[in-house]
Image: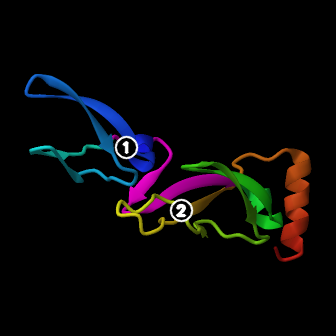
Amino acid sequence: DFMEAVKGVEKEVSIEGKRRKIKIPPGVDDGSRIQFENFILSINVRPHEVFERDGADIYVKITIPYSLAVMGGQIEVPTVDGELKVRIRPGTQPGTMIRLRAQGVLHPRGRGRGDEYVRLNVVVPEKLTREQRRIVDELQEEGL
């Protein structure tokens, strides 16, 4: 499981007909190899529905409303350690990438953590109410 690979886990495996517990260290990635007794085990990690991983870095895509991109504000972003409040600056453009230092995966050999990168997708409304249309018309007249 993705989160087991990030956090580390103890798994029970069957080797030569015997059940044994093996400790998987935090930070292992798909294709990592672990030596266990006289064996070398290859790790397969299932993908996650929210997080993507590149080495020790985590990538996440977040959709924000147009008004938040224009006015700024705060959102909660998922990290491997739970939700984190992130400030959105006024005038944020679609595709903006926010770096969250040390919110990624532990390096397997214990040399710190990777980062998390949050890519912001701005939703532009497809349909507007009359009042919303009037407001947007006023903004357009102002050159926005």
Mark carried by residue 116: 2
Vertical relation: 74 (above or below) 131: below
Between residues 46 and 106, which one lies in front from this camera angle? 106
Rendering coords of residue 134 (x, y %): 91, 56
Q: Is residue 1 visible?
A: no
Rendering coords of residue 11 (x, y %): 31, 33
Judged from the image, the secondary structure of the residue bearing numbered disc 2 is strand
Rendering coords of residue 97 (x, y %): 58, 68
Judged from the image, the secondary structure of the residue bearing numbered disc 1 is loop
Q: What residue is drawn where x is 55% and y is 54%? A: 61
Q: Quadrant of residue 24?
A: top left
Q: Amino acid at mark 2?
A: Glu
Q: Quadrant of residue 15?
A: top left
Vertical relation: 60 (above or below) 82: below
Mark carried by residue 111: none
Q: Among all residues in the image, which is located at the extreme bottom?
A: 143
Between residues 76 and 17, which one lies in front from this camera angle? 17
Answer few, some or many: residues within 10 Å of disc 2's Cα (few below 14, many 20 plus, some between 14 and 19). Answer: many
Q: What residue is drawn where x is 39% and y is 40%? A: 9
Q: What residue is drawn where x is 38% and y is 46%? A: 5
Q: Is residue 10 visible?
A: yes
Let me know if residue 32 is in the magenta part: no
Vertical relation: 83 (above or below) 90: above
Say which residue label 1 marks: 47
Tell me: 50 left or right of 110. right
Region in magenta: 46-64
Tell me: 42 left or right of 90. left
